[in-house]
Image (spheres, rainbow, N blue to C red):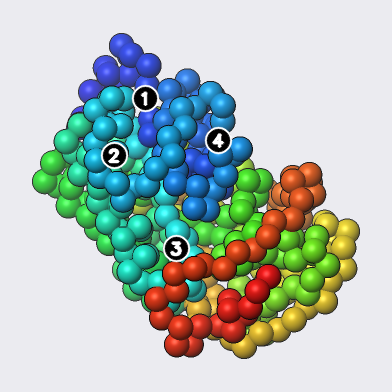
Amino acid sequence: MPLLTIFVRNNFKMISSLVTGGAGFIGAHITNELIEMGHNVVVLDDLSGGYQENVNPRALFVEGSITNYSLILELFEKHNFDYVYHLAAYAAEGLSHFIRRFNYDNNLMGSINLINASIKFNVSCFVFTSSIAVYGGIEPPMKESDFPHPEDPYGVAKFSVEQDLKTANEMFGLNFVIFRPHNVYGEYQNIGDRYRNVVGIFMNQLMQGKELTIFGDGEQTRAFSYIGDVAPHIANCVNHPEAINEVFNIGADQEYTVKELAETTQKVMGISGKLKFLEARNEVTHAYADHSKASKTFNQHSYTSLEEGLTRMADWARTHGSRKSNKFENIEIDTNLPKIWLEEN
């Protein structure tokens, strides 16, 4: 759909946006940003990884799954969405090897339900949160011009959705913007999820007086990215004509080892913890991205420091307290499953 049509539609009615996964971490921040921008926001979330308390009270909350196509069609018909911000996914790269069917049902087929509905109801732009997991183990810093080579089912699903959006654009004119964030942390993160979000895991373990668990030697490097440097650009991308039908890496530029993260997390929490090194798992050792394209498009040239971002998250985490870490109940393959994921919390 031409950008002029977006302008005309938005000039004559309140902008209506759907945020999937809006009770989750990044989705809740996107919802807040959109509401501040004047959008009417509908949040769709099944609460499998998020919390209703995260949802802005000015948004309409609908509890449900993106795998429910009848519900998706009902929402699109009722609300006539201008934009779809698709963040609903179970984003556990390591665990995705062992929950392959669940991963593809939720992260791929659920996304196709949304793309189909967006085509049927003439959505102006589909904003998709992918991941640098699509790159796999290529030499960092990863660039948008690098051809993806995902090494886990989660990355495979994300890249498949990216490809489907491009074909939907070519066949039906559905505009899109794709973001590939990485290692995002901050307020609203589910610190009780033992399978993902290492910052939240560390903070939760510290508040519970437990050892900080690290897979391998802790020398893996990641550019941990504060949510405040990511969410505003994802929300506002539809107002940048040059961003339409483009792919962007988004996140911090400075990489740190997991051990350095553990040390800084202890510092900001004011709690000393013992490091417990576990058997290495199958994961990319060094993963960080080049953001020059996003910096130019969204005019972002500075980022929140790791210590400052962790301090903000620590203040929020202390206020909300630790969370029980529940086991994923539907493991499909237990061969080579890390032992710690089998333990009771």
Could you tell me which secondary element the residue under label 3 belongs to?
A: helix
Question: Which of the two marks, 3 or 4, is nearer to us in this view?
Answer: 4
Question: Marks 1/3: CA distance?
Answer: 29 Å
> Gap in Å between the C-alphas at discs 2 and 3?
27 Å
Where 161 sits versus 316, above or below?
below
What is the count of numbered marks? 4
Question: The disc labelled 3 sits on which kind of residue?
Answer: Ile
Residue bearing mark 1: 16
Whether residues under marks 2 and 1 lie with C-beta atoms below 8 angstroms apart, the answer is: no
* Image quadrant containing the N terminus: top left
Q: Residue at image x 75%, y 81%?
A: 276
Q: CA distance from mark 4 to mark 2?
A: 19 Å
Residue 21 x, y percent position in the rendering: 45, 45
- Which callout, 1 or 3, points at the residue further toward the start of the chain? 1
Q: Nearer the viewer, residue 230 or 295?
A: 230
Q: In the image, what residue occupies the spot 45% across and 59% down?
A: 90
Given contact means CB atoms under 8 Å apart, are the residues at marks 2 and 3 in contact?
no
In the rendered image, is residue 246 in sight? Answer: no
Q: CA distance from mark 2 to mark 1?
A: 15 Å
Marks 4 and 1, how far apart at CA: 16 Å
User: Distance between the Cα atoms at labels 3 and 4?
Assistant: 26 Å
| Residue picked out by circle 2 | 72
Question: Along the horizontal axis of the image, is 171 left or right of 62?
Answer: left
Give the residue pinned by disc 3: 132
Residue 75 location in percent, x, y? 30, 32
- Specify the amino acid type for callout 1: Ser
Checking the image for residue 78, the label placed there is: none
For mark 1, give the secondary structure: strand
State if disc 2 and disc 4 touch (CB < 8 Å).
no
Going from N to C along the chain, the mark reached first, 2 or 3, is: 2
Q: Which mark is residue 55?
A: 4
Mark 4, secondary structure of its residue:
loop
